[in-house]
Amino acid sequence: MPLHVLEHPLAQHVLTHLRDKKTKPVLFRTLSYQISLLLALEATRDLATMEKAIETPLEPMKGRVLAKPLVVVPILRAGLGMLQPFHDVFPDVSVGYVGLERDHKTAIARSYYCKLPPLASARVLVVDPMLATGGSAAQALALVKEQGAIDVGFVCIVAAPEGVATVQKDHPEVPIYVGALDRELNARKYILPGLGDFGDRLYGT
Ligand code: PRP
Ligand code: URA
């Protein structure tokens, strides 16, 4: 499946401030909201619609409305920083949660929580700001598929080529939407140039 990289100038502007180490948590949360809103619109560009008859104040017309439920699955905890714009733009969205945490030494993610709504007939978007080795994303995508999801996408703010390759190998049918595709991982499996530890910067930990 293709990799979709945001090309809007506002995305580049917001990302630059998000990456800046001088950016404090309060602004970091606002910038996370803004880039996630742009990603939410990009990742739902092809959502199915169906006809709906209405009457404007002047005459009847056939409009179109969303045809399929949308489920967003943030990967805890950093994924929560991407959730609000989905709520704001898609008021009927359902939310599922997958808790995964990377071991600091091995960078291998361990699952500690999973609560998912019905997924089979929905468009499911798994969201996590950072796609580094791809281990967390691949695990989360496997979990939602085990629970019945068929129409699945993955949305992240910054990706490393290694993470994109892992997701494309393990889940070749899943489209990936990213704010930026960065250069590489460092020895500790952090993304370069990246933005550091997203969860720590979001929550001031
Ligand atoms: C970060 C990030 C991803 C994961 C990416 O979470 O939010 O979930 O690392 O790395 P990977 O692609 O190598 O798996 P972390 O495990 O630090 O947990 P947190 O969200 O609680 O900060
Ligand atoms: N998780 C983060 O928060 N940042 C990285 O660069 C890699 C994993």
Image (cartoon, rainbow, N blue to C red):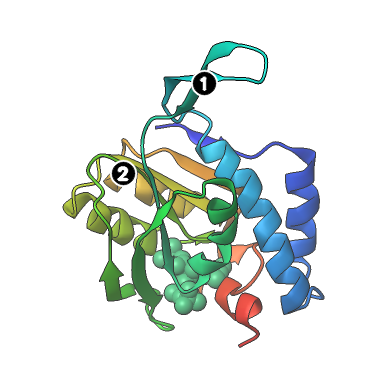
On screen, residue 65 above or below 117: above
Instruction: Name the one closer to the observer, 135 or 15.
Output: 15
Left or right of residue 8, residue 61 in this image: left
- Of 61 and 4, the residue lying toward us: 61
Rendered-image quadrant of the N terminus: top left
Task: Provide the residue designation for mark 1.
Answer: 54
Residue 195 image offset from top left, x and y in percent: 66, 67
Badge number at residue 169: 2
Mark in front: 2 vs 1: 1
Amino acid type, callout 2: Lys
Q: Amino acid at mark 1?
A: Ile
197 relative to 18 in the view: left or right: left
Tag of residue 177:
none
How far is the residue under mark 2 from the one under mark 1? 45 Å
Where is residue 56 drawn, in percent x and y? Answer: 62, 20
The percent coordinates of residue 36 (x first, y second) are 61, 53
Q: Disc count in the image?
A: 2
Q: Looking at the picture, how far across and down is residue 144, in whole percent?
A: 26, 54
* Sequence-wise first label, 2 or 1: 1
Q: Nearer the viewer, residue 25 or 130?
A: 25
